[in-house]
Amino acid sequence: MRWALVKVSLAVTAMVVVAFAVPLGLVVREMARDRAFSNAERRAAAVAPALSITTGRDQLRRVVAAAGSGADMAVHLPASGRTGAVGVGRQRATGEDIAAVRKLGRVSTAEVPGGSALLQPVALSTGDIAVIEVYVAEAEVTNGVGTAWAVLAAVGAALVVGSVAVADRLGVRMVRPARRLVRGARELGEGRLGARVPEEGPAELRLAAVAFNSMADQVVRLLANERELAADLSHRLRTPLTVLRLNAASLGDGPAAEQTRAAVEQLEREVDTIIRTARQAKPQTTAAGPGAGCDAAEVVRERMAFWSALAEDEGRRWRVAGADRPVRVPVARADLAAALDALLGNVFRHTPQGTAFAVDVHSGEDAVIVLVSDAGPGIPDPKAAMARGRGKGSDGSTGLGLDIVRRLAESTGGDVRIGSSVLGGTEVRIWLQRDGRAPARRGPRGTVRRRRHPRTAALPFRRFTRPRARP
């Protein structure tokens, strides 16, 4: 916008300067020419009275010398019966021009080498016509024209520069508020809810800043209301959870009772996490800084120990590969556990009992891949499944499970892909960037680029023999 205003101002001012300076320069030249010839007419008029008194050459020479430079004036007298004209001074005009002036009887000019000649007829007492010739040099005709044109050019340049400077200042006055508005919108879009725009500048941009600040305040209020609502709704779950915990305590001993009590405790912790996160000003699932994160292999072992009891009850074979050594990832332990629970819960919820499943952890220099695969019927439309993960749940699903997994991966610069597993069912790939900066390499849309770890690709299904740990 700023440069557009400068260009428009430059073009308009240049056209105005040209429109006025060129005619004015021509007028100045004509005025200089008129001044030179007016001076020549005055000199000729000073000699004319002497011709009515005498035509003697000596007297005329003295009169011409008194009127000005004798080299620039000449007096042409009638021929007095002889061919040609006589007089005093140097003749520059041709005989035809002099004869034409005598015949017409009015002042005329003629072009001569080096300038022009003013020819003025004068009637003598004898009735004949004498002609006074005044030489006007070209330098006298253009005297002062160059200076006047230089002044006009300087004034025009000053006008152009001044208009450009004024347009630039006006552009700055308009562009700065616009840039502040853009910067505020970008900051608000990045999650900095305290971003506001100074209400300065032209009236329209002030109104835009007022509207932006009002919108930002409304967004903050809406988010606060949403957080409070989420916290209140989560808090309402405490009463039924207390009842479940009391009932679970009376179940006695045994694997099923232990599993039930562990599930209730895990649910209570998740509810507490939801309440704390909702009370905070920003989401908990964010990219961790350097040195933060958790051991993905340890989290996988812990969650598989939790789900293994239910797998045994349903007769499901399962396998864990790549979780026998530490694998550091830049995400919070609770977030990774929630993502794994969401995927494993989908396996138990959407596949028949007895369906096998597996969790593979592949560690690379720049990324960690967690694969959750099953031998179920598969997902015919992976794109639709990811859409449900963005909040379009159906068939008894809230649509939040895949959304939790997606946000976890994207917080590190990675992604989530759904494809077909080697078991014949569904494979969900979670790509976690170790540095949390560069975006993950993406395969074809809706497919998984399989990268099997050389030591885990051919591992058969086996029971996980680690001690069962409480979640």
Image (cartoon, rainbow, N blue to C red):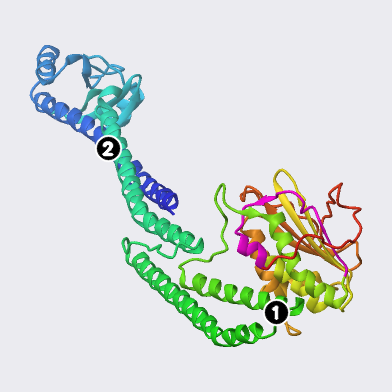
Residue range of the region highlighted in magenta in the rendering:
317-338
Find the residue positioned furthest to the front: 253
- Say which mark, if any, is on residue 28: 2
- Verify whether residue 351 appears in magenta: no
Q: Earlier in the sequence, mark 2 or mark 1?
A: 2
Residue 279 makes an appearance in the image: yes
Which is closer to the viewer, label 2 or label 1? 1
Give x and y (percent) for residue 116: 30, 25
Marker count (numbered): 2
Looking at the picture, does residue 126 appear above or below residue 383?
above
In this picture, residue 377 sits left or right of residue 159? right
Quadrant of the rendering where the N terminus is positioned: bottom left
Q: Amino acid at mark 1?
A: Thr
Residue at 25% over, 14% down: 90
Residue at 17% over, 27% down: 44
Give x and y (percent) for residue 424: 91, 67
Residue at 12% over, 15% down: 65
Find the residue positioned furthest to the top: 58
In this picture, residue 79 sits left or right of residue 42? right
Q: Which residue is mark 1?
A: 260
